[in-house]
Amino acid sequence: MYYANFISSPEGYFHTVICNAQEFRNTVNSDLHFISWDNPSKQHPHHLNLNDMQNMINSNSPFARKFPKEDAVLDKIDCELLSRGPGMLVPGGWCIGIRENGTDPCSDIGNTTVLRPGLGAKRLENLMSSLLSSENFRPRQCK
């Protein structure tokens, strides 16, 4: 009933359901998304663009929305945050090739059990540390 009168119910519905599931009580109440709402808030968040890039990164959130289709910000995320070249997969720790002149670093595969966390993992660690800190966890805990 609450979400019938909510501005944008999909933005909070699923993590509310999870927080109310017995298995997930006493966990962190966050959907881990960077979302920028129009001011004043309308029903949907505004489309993120290159001007939002630094705020997205600073949020340490692993997810973001909403993006316009084929916007330049998506290419920048692919290139700078994910180290993904055009038409390539995001390279994992098993990719041991060298990216030169557009070559795919995953063309050479190393040990597939190796995990080499990058800067994104550090940002996620910072976000989780903040969410789980003594000053943030209790007030934002699923109840």
Image (cartoon, grey):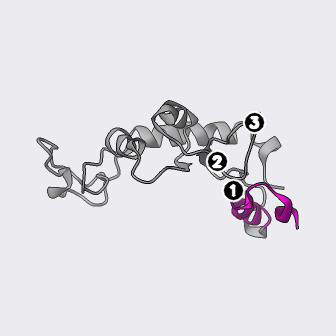
Q: Residue furthest left?
A: 101
Q: Which mark is residue 51?
A: none
The percent position of residue 67, horizontal first and vertical second, equals 50, 49
The percent position of residue 58, horizontal first and vertical second, equals 54, 32
Magenta residues span 1-20
Q: CA distance from mark 1 to mark 2?
A: 9 Å
Residue kind at label 2, given as amino acid type: Pro
**Secondary structure beneath label 2:** loop
Crowd around label 3: few <14 · some 14–19 · many ≥20 (10 Å): few
Residue kind at label 1, given as amino acid type: Glu
- Identify residue for label 3: 134
- Identify residue for label 2: 45
In-image side of 38 versus 75 (left or right): right
The percent position of residue 73, horizontal first and vertical second, equals 42, 41
Q: Earlier in the sequence, mark 1 or mark 2?
A: 1
- Identify residue for label 1: 11
Nearer to the camera, 107 or 96:
107
Residue kind at label 3, given as amino acid type: Ser
The residue lying at 78 percent from left, 49 percent from top is 141
